[in-house]
Image (cartoon, grey):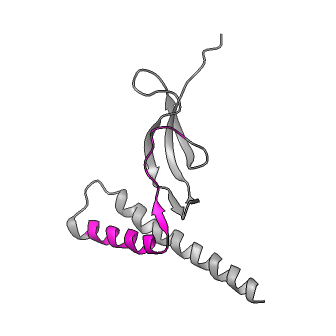
């Protein structure tokens, strides 16, 4: 019974944190952020870090363990194959495990089959 309660508590906490991350997503989606808003986001990220939840480092190449491809563009001169073109939504780690993958747009090599 105690183990079941602990799992329920963890599940509720996880759901709550994911809802808090929506606030960060909304802030980051703004074209310009004022000083107060930026400080609120920084404080939220600090609170999460105290609980070992960290924003993922931005990387150059797509890795399905950490990223969720939500769109693609053709690879070419501007973007190499499997490179991340844009981060649509930041990802987060809980300790060293993926808590929420980053949503990204990825460049992919197209093949011309005629």
Q: Give x and y (percent) for residue 106.
A: 51, 37
Q: Left or right? Give the position of 45 relative to 67.
A: left
The span picked out in magenta is: 37-62
- How many numbered marks are there? 0
Q: Give x and y (percent) for residue 90.
A: 46, 55
- The residue depicted at 58 percent of the width and 73 percent of the height is 15
Q: Give x and y (percent) for residue 1.
A: 78, 89
Q: Left or right? Give the position of 29 relative to 7.
A: left
Q: Give x and y (percent) for residue 64.
A: 60, 44
In the rendered image, which quarter is residue 16 located in?
bottom right
**The stretch drawn in magenta includes residue 43:** yes
Which residue is at the far left?
35
Which residue is at the far front?
96
Up-down relation of residue 21 to residue 102 (above or below): below
Which residue is at the far bottom?
1
In the rendered image, which quarter is residue 94 located in?
bottom right
Which residue is at the far top?
114
**The stretch drawn in magenta includes residue 40:** yes
- The residue depicted at 32 percent of the width and 68 percent of the height is 42
Quarter of the image with the C terminus is top right
Up-down relation of residue 55 to residue 18 (above or below): above
- The residue depicted at 43 percent of the width and 28 percent of the height is 79
- The residue depicted at 41 percent of the width and 68 percent of the height is 23
Up-down relation of residue 27 to residue 80 (above or below): below
């Amino acid at each position: 019974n105690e183990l079941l309660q602990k799992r329920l508590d963890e599940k509720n906490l996880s759901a709550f944190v994911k809802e808090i991350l929506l606030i960060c997503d909304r802030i980051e989606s703004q074209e310009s952020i004022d000083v107060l808003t930026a400080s609120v986001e920084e404080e939220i990220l600090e609170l999460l870090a105290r609980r070992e939840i960290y924003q993922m480092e931005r990387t150059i190449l797509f890795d399905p363990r950490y990223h969720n491809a939500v769109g693609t563009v053709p690879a070419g001169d501007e973007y190499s194959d499997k490179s991340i073109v844009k981060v649509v939504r930041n990802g987060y780690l809980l300790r060293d495990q993926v808590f929420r993958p980053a949503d990204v747009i990825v460049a992919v090599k197209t093949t011309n089959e005629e």
